[in-house]
Amino acid sequence: MNMVTWSPSRLASDLARGLSVGVVLSISATSFAQDADGDDGKAACLAAFQATQAARDAGQLLRAREQALACSQEQCPEVVTSKCKTWLREISTQIPSLVVRAVDEAGHDLSEATLIVDGTEVKSRLDGLPVELDPGEHRVVVQRADGPALEERVVVTLGEQARPIVLRAPRAAGSLAPQPAPPPTPAEVSIHPLTWVGVALAGAGLVAGAITGGLSLAKTAELEEACGGDKHCPPSAEPLHDRATLLSHVSTASFAAAGVGAALGAIGLFVLSDGLFDGPSDGPSVAIGPGSVVLRGRF
């Protein structure tokens, strides 16, 4: 919060300035009133000028805007039009408004109805456009063509524009509120045992292939070192050659088994399993039965 400190000299200066402005306005209004004695147009401008100020002070902003518009015309003296145009801009931003909706017993919007505010009809049908009002309390009534009137009292404040108001008809006696739709039945998924066999075989094949492949590479390195880069290895290097070859074959066979396992797992999961993609379901759960594993949940 900003604190403002008033010094005696500043206070005296502001009071003097305000007093001088008031004196100027008073002199201008007096001079204008004297000139308007024999001119009906100027008299009307003066009356609108005074009515604008009075209506605004009384909170009658709709009337104040009307009068400010009247004294803003070109035929009025410049000193009047300047002030009235300023008032007109200020008042236009201060006038509150309501957007009234009405809903019948079934929850449907009503449009063929009359909108009445404070006993005065303001709309012959509800069109969703705002209704301007003076600040304060108002009695809003929606008169239906085929049913009882709907009524509500509201208090609108200065500058509150396009405030939504909904008038709802009470439900008929004995009518039941709409029941929520039942929750969807959880989908049951049965995973075929072949899926787990394939997954296990694929995993074991990958592990075995990686290990034997690494050992084969190591033995091959030893063999190259023993042969010394010559294509003709000594007889003592033959066991290394046989072991490296054997490990290489085992690694290849292991990777092949992993591929077969992956294929079997895919067949078991996507072809032989039941209900995997039948529809969504809530919270996952697992049930183990003879010859199968059952999963329940959303997939």
Image: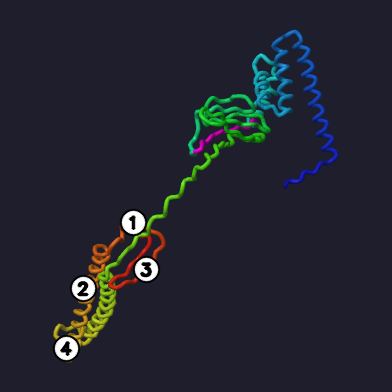
Q: Secondary structure at mark 2?
A: helix
Query: Is residue 96 toward the left or the right of residue 46 in the image?
Result: left
Tell me the mark number nearer the camera, choosing from 3 and 2: 3
Quarter where residue 192 is shown: bottom left
Mark 3–mark 2 distance (CA, rounded to whole Å): 32 Å
Q: Secondary structure at mark 3?
A: strand
Q: Nearer the viewer, residue 21 or 292?
A: 292
Q: Residue furthest front?
A: 174
Task: Identify residue for label 4.
Answer: 238
Mark 2–mark 4 distance (CA, rounded to whole Å): 27 Å
Q: Residue furthest bottom?
A: 236
Mark 1–mark 3 distance (CA, rounded to whole Å): 17 Å
- Report x, y in % for residue 158: 67, 34
Q: Residue at x 41, y 62 (%)?
A: 283
- Report x, y in % for residue 254: 23, 76
Task: Identify residue for label 2.
Answer: 256
Mark 1–mark 4 distance (CA, rounded to whole Å): 62 Å
Task: Identify residue for label 1.
Answer: 279
Query: Is residue 212 toward the left or the right of residue 45 in the image?
Result: left
Q: Decide which of tag 1 and tag 4 comes sooner along the chain.
A: 4
Q: Residue furthest top?
A: 38
Count residues near mark 4 (Cα–Cα under 10 Å), then give few for <14, some for 14-19, many for 20+. some
Q: Is residue 131 magenta?
A: no
Tell me the mark number nearer the camera, choosing from 3 and 4: 3
Contact between labelled residues 4 and 3, with CB atoms less than 8 Å apart: no
Count residues near mark 3 (Cα–Cα under 10 Å), then give few for <14, some for 14-19, many for 20+. few
Q: Is residue 270 above or below residue 8?
A: below
Q: Decide which of tag 1 and tag 3 comes sooner along the chain.
A: 1
Task: Identify residue for label 3.
Answer: 286
Q: Which residues are magenta?
A: 94-105
Q: Residue at x 51, y 42 (%)?
A: 174
